[in-house]
Image: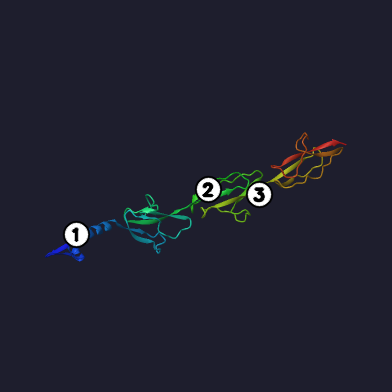
Amino acid sequence: MIFMEIGNEKIKEPFWSKVERHKSFLIAIGIILLYILAKDLVTMTAVPIYGYEGEYLYSIETHVGKRIMDPPAITEVPGYSIVWYDNPEGTGYDISFPYYVERGVELYPQLEPIKYAIFFDSMGGSAVWSILREYGYPVEAPAPPQKPGYAFAGWYADHWYLFEYEFTTMPLNGITLYARWTPNHYTIRFETDGGSPVAPLIAEYQTEITLPADPEKTGFVFAGWYVDVACTQPAILDLMPLGGMTLYARWLPE
């Protein structure tokens, strides 16, 4: 506390009097503070993405050393992620958030396609590797799977085989495809060993079959169909076997 002495009395100095006496010092301190603040004040601008020129992003003033928690809000583009760079070419390292401000910067958003997968359910056939590719990139059909007794009939987007899939580019969010199979047709032939001829039996793989009427041979009694020429293994068939087969008639003398 400062006092002024007038005669034999001490009088307290008024506040504004003190300010006036130290004005030069206070002005100098203020100038120094303003310089420091101005020196650390930077502008951070998010530049609109191509095709979004009318969409306002932001331009903020902040200070060196501050942390920006979230990237600028921008309308999402299906199939793409938005990556931020400090140059319009989208080169160098991308900028991650939280972002620590080191200088004034312009942020440039770049659209980068998201990788999706096409999965294949071969429905009992041989395994097919998934395709992993960026959204919108060209994709080709894989080599057809294999399944004994069946012919591959294409890839479908549903279990009911209503929508056959056409391979063009990687679809949004990827997809699971299902193999469609059609059974092969096979033939059972009949060797009557001198008996009356029997027409071949043609049917789809694994479908039910009925053996034909017994052949006839003068002086002999038909004793059944066998899977081998020596007639040691009787043929027991309910379904068309894989690849078809030939059956042999066995005869016993009357």
Residue type at mark 1: give it.
Phe
Q: Which residue is mark 2?
A: 131
Q: Earlier in the sequence, mark 1 or mark 3?
A: 1
Q: Secondary structure at mark 3?
A: strand
Going from N to C along the chain, the mark reached first, 3 or 2, is 2
**The quadrant where residue 11 appears:** bottom left
In the image, residue 107 lies at what x, y percent? Answer: 36, 56
Can you say whether 235 is above or below 93 in the image? above
- Residue 182: give its label: 3
Crowding near pointer 3: few (<14 within 10 Å), some, many (20+)?
A: few
Residue 208 drawn at (x, y percent) = 74, 47
CA gap, disc 2 and disc 1 = 73 Å
Q: Position of residue 234 (x, y in %)?
A: 78, 38
Compared across the picture, whether 123 is left or right of 246 comes to left
* Kind of residue indicated by mark 3: Thr
- Tell us which disc is closer to us: 3 or 2: 2
**Residue at 58% in and 51% down:** 177
Q: Quadrant of the C terminus?
A: top right
Locate the N terminus and report the quarter of the image it occupies: bottom left
Reading the chain from its start, which is encountered first: label 2 or label 1?
1
**Which dot, 1 or 3, sits closer to the camera?**
1
Give the residue number, with chain letter if any, for mark 1.
Answer: 25
Question: SS class of the residue under badge 1?
Answer: helix
Residue pictured at 64% horizontal, 47% vertical: 151
Is 178 positioned to the left or the right of 95 in the image? right
Residue 157: x and y, percent?
59, 54
